[in-house]
Image (cartoon, rainbow, N blue to C red):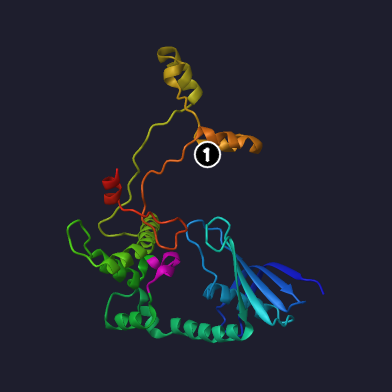
Amino acid sequence: MENELLVEQRFHLHELHSDLFGTSDAIVWQPSIERLSVIDLKYGAGVPVEVEDNPQLQYYALGALLANKQWKPREVEVVIVQPRCPHPDGPVRAQVLQVVDLLDFAADLVEAVKRTEEASAACLCADSGPLEAQWQRMYLHAGDHCRFCPAAAICPAQKNKAQQLAKQAFAPGLPYDAQQLAETLEWLPVLEAWIKNTREFAYAEAEKGHDIPRHKLVEKRATRKWRSESDAAAVIVPIIGADAAFEHKLMSPAAMEKCLPKDQRKILDDLCVKESSGHTLVHESDKREAIKEDAKSAFASA
């Protein structure tokens, strides 16, 4: 029996809920080992996606199972392919799930969908009040996942978290809690995404003609550019000369490497030096090795 490959297969979870559907990037059925592999391509370069206990992958796996009932897998493998984002486990990461685990996930999924249909869910976009506060405590959970949420710009949980963190004061000489500082640092990417989403949402609303109090659309600052570079050069070069009119600069090592044949790129090793521009603070999951000595020790030993 040969393996089967399906690419971009649409699925609809009618058995669970009429509004649940999706598209699997790739599905591989291996009858010899009774394994169904569900592969998801992540092309983002900024945020590594974890494969372990990933609800999105479990959703795709469930969709593949129900869309291909002719297959009777013993286990389901979910795979993330993320070639542009470094990860300690490499660009291809997988987890094997048991079919019974996906059935449990299906029950949780249906329960979560039903929550969104409750009357109190309408409070998501309402002004803050007792009912909204109760709904937030029950269902809204701000977290790292919020950076990808299309409703981030209008989510009260995101707004409350931003206001909470904005009240924290960190400045030289002031006492602070190290754990609180660490939590704030970990939340910065989420807040930065929230700020970006809010700005884009507000801009889109303004472009539609919707009034946003105390804000307005204006023309961006105008910058000059040549109507025609050749016409400009013909007029200016006779006056100041070609050397003054044109910029000449050696390409960077990275750009030069792309121009050189592969078998000659080693010549750059003797022509280049790697110099760090300084230090940067990152999360402990970053694969780079931590700096051993602090700045005070470095100056003391100099």
Q: Is residue 219 above or below residue 252?
A: below
Locate residue 286: give its quadrant.
bottom left
Q: Residue 274: where, in percent of width, then height?
A: 46, 40
Label 1 Cα crowd, 10 Å radius (few <14 / some 14-19 / many 20+): few
- Residue 12 visible at all: no
Q: Residue 3: where, in percent of width, then height?
A: 77, 71
Residue extending farthest to the top is 238
- Residue 233 visible at all: yes
Q: Residue 45: where, in percent of width, then height?
A: 51, 56
Q: Residue 248: where, in percent of width, then height?
A: 47, 24
Residue extending farthest to the right is 1
Residue shown at the point (34%, 40%) measured from the top left: 221
Total marks shown come to 1
- The residue lying toward the viewer, choosing from 117 and 71, is 71
Locate residue 213: give its quadrant.
bottom left
Q: Does the magenta stretch include residue 149?
A: yes
Image quadrant containing the C terminus? top left
- The residue lying toward the viewer, choosing from 73 and 266, is 266
Residue shown at the point (39%, 32%) measured from the top left: 224
Q: In this view, does 82 lie to the left or right of 231?
A: right
Residue shown at the point (48%, 26%) measured from the top left: 228
Q: Is residue 200 above or below residue 159?
A: above
Q: Does the magenta stretch include residue 256?
A: no
The magenta segment: 142-152
Q: Is mark 1 on a helix, strand or loop?
A: helix
Q: Mark 1 points at which residue?
A: 254
Q: In this view, does 292 lie to the left or right of 255?
A: left
- The residue lying toward the viewer, choosing from 228 and 212, is 228
Image quadrant containing the N terminus? bottom right
Q: Which amino acid type corresponds to the residue marked 1 in the rendered image?
A: Ala
Locate residue 240: give its quadrant.
top left
